[in-house]
Image: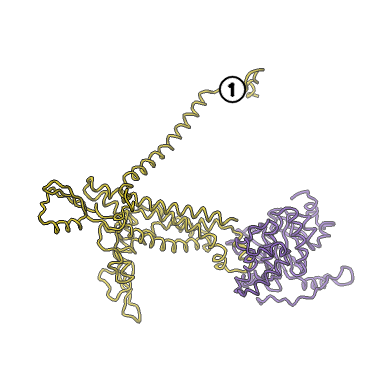
Chain colours: A yellow, B purple
Amino acid sequence: MPNEAKNPPPEQGENPFAAKAHSLKRRDKTVSILLGVATYFILVCTAYIFLDIALKGIPVVFQTEAPFVNVEFFTKSPETLMTFETEEGDFFKMNFSDYSQFKRDNPEVNIVDEHSHAYSGGGIFGPLVGTALLTAICIVVALAVGLTTAIFLNEYATKGRFMDTVRLAIMNLAGVPSIVFGLFGLGLFCMVAPVITDTPMDRALFTVPIIFTDNYLSFEGWGTCMLAGGFTLAVMILPVVITACEESLKAIPMGFREASLALGATKWQTIKKSVLPYAFPGMLTASILGITRVAGETAPIMFTAALAHKDELPWESAGSIGGFFSQSVQAMPYHIYTVAARIPQSEYTKPMQYGSVFVFMVVVMSFAALSIFLRIRYRKKLKW
Amino acid sequence: MNTYMSDQKEQVTLPPRGDGTSDREAHQVAAHRAVIEIDDVNFEYVSGVDVLRNISMNINKGEVTAFIGPSGCGKSTLLRCLNRMNDLIPKAGLTNGEIRILGTDIYDPLVDVIELRKHVGMVFQKYNPFPKSIYENVAYGLRIQGVNRKSVLDEAVENSLKLAGLWDEVKDRLDASGLGLSGGQQQRLCIARTIAVEPKIILMDEPCSALDPISTAIIEDLITQLKDEFTIVIVTHNMQQATRVSDRTAYFYLGELIEMDETIKIFSNPSQKKTEEYISGRFG
């Protein structure tokens, strides 16, 4: 045997386990260090992002005197911030509304060195409300469409080439860049989607009169509004939701379905009573996790729903339920984009920037944490 | 058709051979007793590959019939044909022959598979109670039929659990989860769930293969008791189990029915060499 010739049996008294190949050992160590460095690099990046935002954002959001939270930051919508000095050399910093009041109250004061900083005053109430509404619409639409699609794909559709194509299409949808979704939403929901109206617009693609009424089904689009934005976000997150829902359905043991069918249940009874109740928690949490990610998207809403500035909150100018949903809104991601990239930068814009980012990050992260917490709880509850 | 007649109540005993009755008459009498008639059945999962070939047999009322044979011989497939569970598998189906249960061809387009499964219940290899309470597990079959009267359900649950020999063990905790029971109890819960819808026939697909010997013995006792009210078909890998619980045994090999006869005869004096080789453990 050739092996025996290479490794002669150790002589008496010699340690048979003594290290022989030192170079191999050294290489092993190098590799482990290299792999470790790559991992710690991610840790450093994450820590830097979080610490930087937290350190600069926390002073904006919290304060040292009661009520310890900067209430104005959460209850006011963004305004222009004015900074100016008087001839006496006093420095003032105030929101534009206060500034007009100040000038009216003190007409004798001579203002010098006046600067305006767009969107840097006030608070973020408007964008928060807008994002909440957009996300809510997105959750409803994405869950409704995603759930039904997943049930169909997993429980009803027969396997075959056509279904494989459908699945592939859904997967591909996940790879479409978000700006394309924004344009898609603009093209479909804002400009073509059907509305019921008695006075169709000229730009409608076509109109269909509804019999027995004076109304028309007019394919004129919903315009730039939160409904269009929510739908666009929903379409964007659909692949994630469908996959999550399908995985949850697949996790339900086949035995439940078989047992139910063998007892004489119909397919829908089986799904309704023995599959969905156990799959639903998983579906919900996984979907929420995906949806929190889409809540931070800017591109899909910038053409379809979001405005950089809007004075009224949605309910202040709604009129009707339809009117409520057909308004454009401010939204957190778009607001952050605006204050970070669209306005002249100065030291006075920083608080708004960091405050917005910090609050938004905390909101999204707490939703993600909530969904993970819920998932762990349900996992413990449902065991089979 | 499509109504499952249950007027074949009187037990017709098979006349002993050699007393003058011709084979033909004996066959007719046997056919009258049969609740399941399998007639020249071929079955395929994939087009062109028959996993069951020309199976013909009768399964008698009030008897326990065991299907034995090595893995992949088609015994579970045949069992699942009997309540059309194979319908769940796309493209699978009978390619030849017919299966009549209580005189009706169950693959007839007029047969509603939902109704069929109410008459032909099934107990699975891996006990699979729903993650619901014990009560709701047993009541499930009735609830999906639209029975919601508490008194009716209470009675059915109690009777079924008593029949399954589980009542004394669980009567104080009917609201507890079915998954909290031991393996053997869970399998008996599944049996109780099946008999709650009052089927005529119960199919059992290796009901004890996931259980310990003591639970197995309890289930086997239960099977022997249940045969007074139900016709039972059981697939088993355990030949001792077949001898203990069954009246008649069918031996399958590679998709063919090699031999079917009274269990005592199959295990003491099989007429086919293949059967003898299998039951003596020479292969399989």
Image quarter for residue B203?
bottom right
Is residue A303 at least partly visible in the picture? Answer: no
Could you say which is closer to the camera, residue A321 or residue A252? A321
Q: Identify the element where label 1 is drawn.
A: loop
Could you say which is closer to the camera, residue A247 or residue B191? B191
Residue B43: horizontal and vertical position, in percent? 65, 62
Taking A220 as reference, is A10 above or below it?
above
Q: Quadrant of the C terminus of chain A?
A: bottom right
Could you say which is closer to the camera, residue A197 or residue B14? A197
At horizontal 31% and vertical 71% (from top left) the residue drawn is: A320
Residue A290: horizontal and vertical position, in percent? 42, 54
Q: Quadrant of the N terminus of chain A?
A: top right
Image quarter for residue A264?
bottom right
Residue A73: horizontal and vertical position, in percent? 29, 54
Query: Which chain does the residue under circle 1 lie in?
Result: A
Lateral position of residue B162 relative to residue A156, left or right: right
Is residue A54 at least partly visible in the picture? Answer: yes
Lateral position of residue A304 relative to residue B210, left or right: left
Residue A161: horizontal and vertical position, in percent? 49, 58
